[in-house]
Structure formats: C-alpha cells, structure tokens
Amino acid sequence: MSEIQLIELTVNGERHDLAIEPRRTLVDVLRHDLGLTGTHVGCEHGICGACTVLVDGAPVRACLLFAAQAEDADIRTVESLAEPDGTLSDLQQAFSAHHGLQCGFCTPGFLMLAEGYLAERPDASKEEIREVVASNLCRCTGYQTIVEAVDDCASRRRTALQEQLDRRSA
Ligand code: FES
Ligand code: FES
C-alpha cells in the first residue's frame, strides 16, 4: 500500500487539508481532489503551459510540481479571476473582446500566465508580452489575438491607475 501524506494547501484563499500520495502533482490534486477543473492538463511535461497557475504570484506549471511542494504557498487558479457573481475580470473580458481564444483549451494557462506577468510588469511592452506568451502553446489563435488581449488589459490597467493618481493629487 502506498504511503499517504497529510498536507495543507491554500487555493484561491481557501485552506484545504488533504491526505494524498506524495507522488501526486499539484494539477492532479487541484482537478481531482478540489474540483478546480479550470486548470487544464495537456502534455504533463512542462511544455504546453495549459496547467499554469500562480504560486505566490508567480506563474508555475502545475504538472511539474508535487502538490506537497506547494504547501504554505498561496495558490491561485483561473477560478479566482472572475467575481463571485460571475462577472469576468478585466483580463478575461479583454480575451473575449479580442477573440483571444477559439477552442479555449489553452486559455486558463494563458490567463494565469498573463495575470502573473502583468502584476510583475504592469508597463510591459507589446514585444515583451509577445515573448512571454510564447512560453505557452495555443494550436488555434496564431497568438496575435492573445497578445492584443494582454496588451489591451495592461494598457487599461495603466490608464485606471493613472486616473486614480490624478484624482488623489487633484
Ligand atoms: S500540462 Fe503542464 S505544461 Fe503541459
Ligand atoms: S484556443 Fe485552442 S489551443 Fe488555444
């Protein structure tokens, strides 16, 4: 019989106590134990990026991490982006507006990659965004619409921040 390990994961602000086999990956536990099926599994080899989630704010391939390695970390999945009433986040709305998805299989990974990246680099140029999204695989869009969506979201966030600053200093 295989060994069982007790771990505690914090996902989308909720704490979960789990009894799992140490060999299980984070993406497997997110999907099968916590029911967070928005995180997709493609290659299971760290290549496609469909399984990207945020671990302490950084985009991480959840198929390459054992769930036990993510103990004590703050994990965010694509389910955390929309408001509880279902209103899509600004980034999700930008993907919709720019047709940044077709089949949508890759989309959760791109959203979490972009969410983590823009938090770190809010003033990223379009060229930088193009380079960053190249780390994930999309077989449908040709990438241009994904780049447009992320760039538009970044630009709207910058404008909103500037308006806040202007109001404060007025
Ligand atoms: S499923 Fe994790 S990178 Fe492809
Ligand atoms: S939208 Fe189909 S794989 Fe990206």
Image: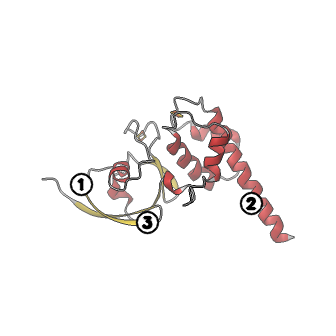
Disc with the residue nearer the chain's start (2 vs 3): 3
Q: Residue at x 65, y 32 (%)?
A: 144
Q: Residues within 10 Å of mark 3 (few under 14, many from 20)?
A: few
* Residue named by callout 3: 14
**Closest to the observer, 7 or 102:** 102
* Residue named by callout 2: 161
User: Between marks 2 and 1, how big is the CA–CA gap?
Assistant: 45 Å
Q: Which mark is residue 8?
A: none
The part of the image, by quadrant, that contains residue 19 is bottom left
Do callouts 2 and 3 mark residues in contact (Cβ within 8 Å)? no
Q: Position of residue 61 (x, y in %)?
A: 44, 46
Count of number-bearing discs: 3
Q: Is residue 118 left or right of residue 163?
A: left
- Give the residue type that dot 3 points to: Glu
Q: Quadrant of the C terminus?
A: bottom right
User: Between marks 1 and 3, how big is the CA–CA gap?
Assistant: 21 Å
Quadrant containing ligand 1 reads top left
Q: Position of residue 134 (x, y in %)?
A: 56, 36
Asked if residue 93 is positioned above or below residue 142 in the image, the reply reads: below
Please identify the residue farthest to the left as the structure is shown.
Answer: 1
**Residue 71 in view:** yes
* Residue named by callout 1: 21
Q: Is residue 126 left or right of residue 89?
A: right
- Give the residue type that dot 1 points to: Glu
**Residue 124 in view:** no
Do callouts 2 and 1 mark residues in contact (Cβ within 8 Å)? no
Asked if residue 131 is positioned above or below residue 8 in the image, the reply reads: above
The part of the image, by quadrant, that contains residue 11 is bottom left
Q: Position of residue 76 (x, y in %)?
A: 48, 57
Q: Residues within 10 Å of mark 2 (few under 14, many from 20)?
A: few
Of tags 1 and 3, which is closer to the observer?
3
